[in-house]
Image (cartoon, rainbow, N blue to C red):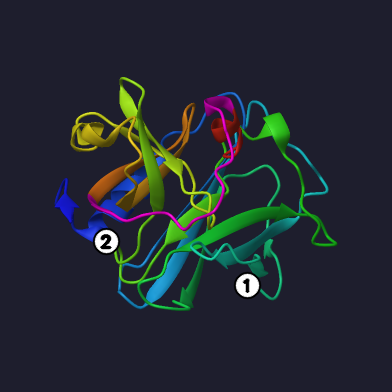
Amino acid sequence: MFRILRSHAAMAFRVLFAGALLAGSVDAGTLLAQAGCADGTHITVFWSFTENPAEPTGHPEWVGYDVERRPLASCGAYERLNAAPFPRTPGVSENFQYMEIAPATAAMFEYRVVPVDALRQPVALGFDCDFCSYVAWASCPDLSAALTQGTIEDIGWAVLVHPCPDGCYRSFYVENPEADALRPYAGTATVVRLFGFPFCGTVEGCGMHVDHFDLAPCAPTPTLPSTWGRIKAGYR
């Protein structure tokens, strides 16, 4: 195991979520989600929609939010968790949270916050939601499961993780100086597992702060080609 930085898990989670809330655009509404396991047994999903009063988002059909979950490593189907949608108040900025006992320990789960209409059908906000990030990840305890796993590409100001084709791992970028510990593996077939905290809602997509990493091979599944543009599009 290779440790990049030491962090207090709960504190790091709170700092990342607070930073995400400050990243809202002045041009459109911003929806940002984050999740964590501060007490070691419960996963809490937080999300915030920040409305711009000068340019309201609209979408009168948008009445609330659903929260969905799937296990990350096995790439299972999403499961809706809330019995009724979390109601939205049109035209205002709001914060929400959903808490549950972790479905398993030392396993990473992906959560998705879905804007829905009265029939619980997804509402596509498109350009009315600027740099929005609907997806969050958490394991209990924090840092007990890898956030992503794959090979490393050096893109200069950061390194990019190209995820293993098995499972549903996502691509994340890791900025300097944390990236320096991963650069020896760039351009090689070495597969790394990265443990840390994500942050989303940026132009580049989603980055992560790495606590530690180790080396572990992907499962033998054929690799599909991708592009940096396609990776960024997956977070919009």
In primary-sequence order, the first of circles 2 and 1 is: 2
Residue 215, image x, y percentages: 27, 52
Query: In the image, is residue 157 above or below residue 162?
Result: above
Numbered range of the magenta stretch: 212-229
**Disc 2/disc 1 C-alpha distance (Å):** 23 Å
Residue 29, image x, y percentages: 61, 35
According to the picture, the residue beneath numbered tag 2 turns out to be 10
How crowded pointer 2 is (Cα within 10 Å; few <14, some 14-19, many 20+) is rated as some
User: In front: 61, or 141?
Assistant: 141
**Residue 168 within the segment the image draws in magenta:** no
How crowded pointer 1 is (Cα within 10 Å; few <14, some 14-19, many 20+) is rated as some
- Snapshot quadrant of residue 81: bottom right
Residue 17, image x, y percentages: 38, 49
User: Residue, x 35% and y 58% (percent of image)?
Assistant: 146
According to the picture, the residue beneath numbered tag 1 turns out to be 81
Report the amino acid beneath label 2. Ala
Q: Is residue 42 visible?
A: yes
Local secondary structure at mark 2: helix
Left or right? Give the position of 211 relative to 170.
left
